Amino acid sequence: MSEAVRAFFDGLAKGGGRMLRQVSGTVRFDLRYPDRVDFWLVRIDQGRITVSRGEAADTDTVICTDEQLFLRMAHGEIKPVPAWLRNDFTADGEFRFVMLLERLFAPPPDAHHPREVAGRQHPRALAECRQPPPGEAAPPTRDGESR
């Protein structure tokens, strides 16, 4: 097992799943190497994540991939759902956990929130959206006066 894989799973367990507060279930990652397969079991309980090593017969979803693709997804270089659609990795079990992989893995390195991008590209349009249409009074402020 590589240190990068161990670091990812350690960080996942320490960081928790703030984006997974309403999720519970288990996902086993079968990471293929040339000479072996490593098994990582991720248990999610209302956003609390625990990670263990080894096989588990009772899992909701099994993700099978090689270490290189796994690390590229973990670092945000490849989005999991399109990779799954291309058959770059296999998933057996509940499909919702394939969709949730994007919450477990890092966002792409150059990712930005859509509002942040829109504000940079169209600052005047955003400012105009906040102003009332011509001829209409501005909504009152907290103290009851118009703006």
Image (spheres, rainbow, N blue to C red):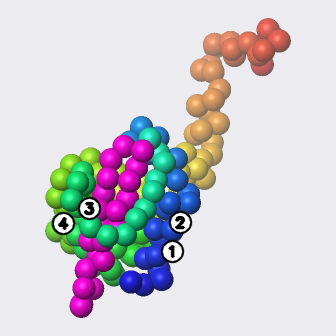
**Residue at x 18% of width, y 53% of height:** 93
The label on residue 90 is 4
| Residue type at tag 2 | Gly
The answer to whether one can see residue 107 in this image is no
Within the magenta stretch, is there residue 8? no
Question: Which segment did they paint magenta?
Answer: 24-45
**Residue at x 69% of width, y 14% of height:** 139
Q: CA distance from mark 4 to mark 2?
A: 24 Å
Q: Secondary structure at mark 4?
A: strand
**Residue at x 24% of width, y 91% of height:** 35
Badge 4: residue crowd in 10 Å (few <14, some 14–19, many ≥20): some
Q: Which residue is mark 1?
A: 7
Within the magenta stretch, is there residue 38? yes
Q: Which residue is mark 2?
A: 11
Q: Earlier in the sequence, mark 1 or mark 4?
A: 1
Query: Count of labels shown?
Result: 4
| Residue type at tag 4 | Thr
The label on residue 56 is 3
* Label pair 2/3, CB-CB below 8 angstroms: no
Q: Secondary structure at mark 1?
A: helix
| Residue type at tag 3 | Ala
Q: CA distance from mark 1 to mark 4?
A: 23 Å
Q: Earlier in the sequence, mark 1 or mark 3?
A: 1
- In this view, 59 is above or below 144: below
- In this view, 85 is above or below 60: below
Give percent across and percent down for residue 115. 55, 45
* Label pair 1/2, CB-CB below 8 angstroms: yes
Residue lying farthest to the top in this orientation: 144
- In this view, 3 is above or below 50: below
The answer to whether one can see residue 127 in this image is yes
Numbered disc in front, either 2 or 3: 3
Numbered disc in front, either 4 or 2: 2
